[in-house]
Amino acid sequence: MTRRFLFLTGSTRPEGNTELLARRAADQVPADVQQRWIDLARHPLPEFEDLRHDTDHTRPTEGNASLLLDATLAATDIVIASPLYWYTLSTPVKRYLDHWSGWLRTPGLDFGATLAGRTLWGVTALAHEEREVADPLIGALNNSAAYMGMRFGGVLLGNGSRPGDVLRDTDALTRAKTFFAREAPFARFPYEAAGATATR
């Protein structure tokens, strides 16, 4: 299958450090690979309404929900570019992932089957020098990918607070050059990985 990258930026600050780092990584994607960029703050989804036990799930046919659903289904690689907000994903990104729950239950959509085997990636900028503070964000993306049967390429981390700071993080810029070059493994929940280690 021809690769098609969907970059979803989730910052409330245009051209923030996370987006700058994501674009540096995207610069290394081969020119013949399609890229699509959507700013979730500028294409806001409605608040998610949990109807998992109801039967009135319908496919959105207009507006941002339709745009994002179609873009998600078309992508082989979904890149979540979310700054670290209160140690996890930003609100626009979290709302987008919440809508996956509804799309999974929409008759005839085959959302789960379509995304299974495809790849989820993450990019984030954080103000802390200690990268462990990003573990909740990384865990949310890894576990979402595991639930969906997707591959997980990991999260490209960069350091920055003021606009443009991440461009001085030479380690992050070096990692960005090869971030999308490797084949991502299938995501596993932490308890699955722990169980595999224990049986060796």
Image (cartoon, rainbow, N blue to C red):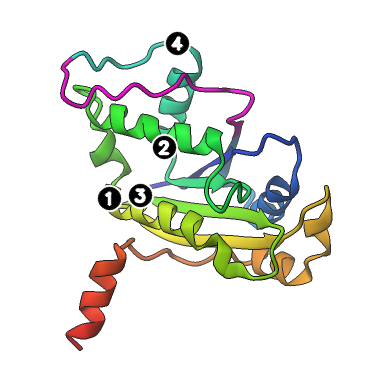
- Does residue 78 appear in this view? yes
Upstream in the sequence, badge 2 or badge 4? Answer: 4
> Pointers 3 and 2 in contact (CB under 8 A)?
yes
Going by the numbered disc 3, the residue's amino acid type is Ser
**Residue at the disc numbered 4:** 62
Residue in view at x 33 percent, y 61 percent: 187
Q: Is residue 12 magenta?
A: no
Q: Nearer the viewer, residue 14 or 74?
A: 14
The answer for how far apart the CA atoms under marks 4 and 3 are is 26 Å
**Residue at the disc numbered 3:** 144
Please state which of the two labelled residues, at mark 4 or mark 3, is closer to the viewer. 3
Mark 4 Cα-neighbour bin, 10 Å: few <14, some 14–19, many ≥20: few
**Residue at the disc numbered 1:** 147
Mark 1 Cα-neighbour bin, 10 Å: few <14, some 14–19, many ≥20: some
Q: Which residues fall within the magenta stretch?
A: 38-55
The answer for how far apart the CA atoms under marks 3 and 2 are is 8 Å
Question: Where residue 116 sits in the image (x, y, percent)?
Answer: 28, 47
Please state which of the two labelled residues, at mark 2 or mark 4, is closer to the viewer. 2
